[in-house]
Image (tube, helix red, strand yellow):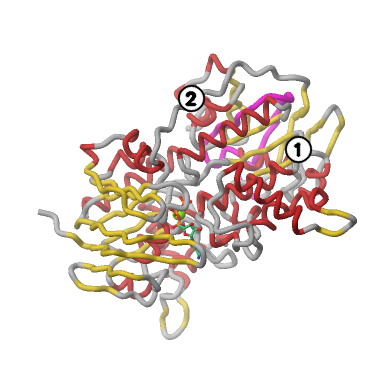
Amino acid sequence: MAVPVIDIQQVTKRFPGVVALSDVTFDILEGEFHSICGENGAGKSTLMKILSGVQTEYEGEILVRGEVAHFRGTRDAEQAGISIIHQELNLVEQLSVAANIFLGRELTTGGFLNDREMEKQAAELFKQLECAIRPDQLVGELRVGDQQLVEIAKALSLKSDILIMDEPTSALTETEVERLFRVIERLQSQGVTILYISHKMEEVFRLSDRITVLRDGRHVQTLDRSETSARDISHLMVGREIENVHLGGERQPGEVILEVEELSLPWPGHAREWRLENVSFNLRAGEVVGIAGLMGAGRTELLETLFGARSERHTGEVRLDGERVRFRHPLEACNAGLAMVSEDRKRLGLFSLMSVRENITLCTLPEVTSAGLISSSLEEQAAQESIKQLGIKTAGPEAPVVSLSGGNQQKCIIARWLRTNPKVLLLDDPTRGIDVGAKAELYRVIDQLCRDGLGILVTSSEMPELITLCDRILVLCEGRLTGELTRDEFSEQRIMELATTGID
Ligand SMILES: Nc1ncnc2c1ncn2[C@@H]1O[C@H](COP(=O)(O)OP(=O)(O)OP(=O)(O)O)[C@@H](O)[C@H]1O
Ligand SMILES: [Mg+2]
């Protein structure tokens, strides 16, 4: 019989204006894979932060192996064998990968940092994860997906027997998810207890022994996987039925709005030489074009190049409304009618010191300016509108944006760009970390924008998402376009084939 390793008893957590957790009671059994599900803002991360010693103020009790634990910090939790992989990555960008992994418990010899040994051990961890990240690289130079792998390596290095994973796969592609699952299975066979948060039901249903649903900070139910289904769980999460999204009838794309011809982006010092090579395609007004590909295929680089957000000089031609453009800065792109929701909200999207209102209206200040002054009432009105449109869960427009849950922060960024009324909208994995209900909502918003005449380019790490949203899908593989599919040719298998063409 499995015994509880963690007992959560009547835990309540209040923030100013929000009750994040309310009288939550359930337990985690030794060696089980336990998933926590719930909408954006349901309280999942907050509970995990309490269990891992990040959040130290709360009401109620946490028992670890039968004893009341009151962690004063993550160090205490780590000592009790609990570590966490955070949803909002917690890495120091200016430090190397190895330094991040051993942060706060650096290896030393004779009083000096032993970089060599740390790099060696880090390399060992990456070998376990079957990935080729260099331990001496700066974390700031890595893509989010790789940064996520560094977080995972860090947690592994602690050799914890309870591992909390808060949306570990949100920036990983299918192959990387597979890899992570192999690692998880190995950990499980060593008896490690896993607490897992994900908005992706197929992940939840793959390995879970039990699933707990939280709604509005309350514990709804803890179920055995065998006695429930993805449909039941979604229903418990939102308290109503979520219909499958059907996006009306055929769209009628208009004129070509964006033309890309033989676009190449250099990759100095890299064996592959080009991040993007001879990419050509066009986008019409009133059309959604998807860009599929594995991580590293160049999806983000393509969107960033179009948006003027890359420092390398590209070759080839980009035409917007028939006119040749070359943006050196996102601001220029923005002024010309482009908008981009970026994949890495921490680096390019969120202004963490500002409020929800400021984050939403940041790019549309003229809209809220009256007689040359920013009108706070117009600004507030605009923010309220967006909060309503996208169902952003916040104590109010004035709440600091960092006080929002991960998914709700993402919605703020989307709201900001929607307000700019662009001609072309670039969406880089826009639904990362967004719950099922909100996703369906966002699909409808995207569809409506498209029908209003916007041209939309979207990438996603989830193929079903592209298949639902797009009129055409372009597939990138190692920086080159390997295929283009129209709606009647869409299938996950076909996309996967094209995404791996030419990779040995
Ligand atoms: N530091 C904070 N200050 C104020 N409010 C907070 C803070 N952290 C979380 N909250 C609030 O607590 C509630 C629960 O947030 P939490 O991050 O736990 O949600 P979540 O279930 O992890 O959602 P998501 O799926 O979007 O990550 C939200 O309403 C959030 O705004
Ligand atoms: Mg969260």
Q: Is residue 291 magenta?
A: yes
In the image, residue 120 lies at what x, y percent? 41, 64
Q: Which residue is mark 1?
A: 422
Depth check, front residue: 122 or 46: 46
Disc 2 residue type (three-letter): Glu
Report the mark closest to the observer, 1 or 2.
1
Task: Name above or below for residue 106 compared with residue 192.
Answer: below
Mark pair 1, 2: CA separation: 33 Å
Q: Residue at horizontal 62%, vertical 32%?
A: 446
Label 2: element kind: helix
Q: Residue at horizontal 22%, vertical 52%?
A: 32
In the image, residue 98 lies at what x, y percent? 47, 65
Task: Name above or below for residue 497 compared with residue 9.
Answer: above
Q: Is residue 113 left or right of residue 138?
A: left
Q: Which mark is residue 497?
A: 2
Q: Is residue 278 magenta?
A: yes
Q: Is residue 475 left or right of residue 266?
A: left
In the image, residue 361 lies at what x, y percent? 72, 52
Residue segment shown in magenta: 269-298
Disc 1 residue type (three-letter): Pro
Q: Is residue 487 left or right of residue 348?
A: left
Q: Residue at horizontal 83%, vertical 44%?
A: 335
The answer to whether residue 149 of the structure is visible from this angle is no
Which residue is outermost to the bottom?
111
Q: Residues within 10 Å of mark 2 (few under 14, many from 20)?
A: some
Label 1: element kind: loop
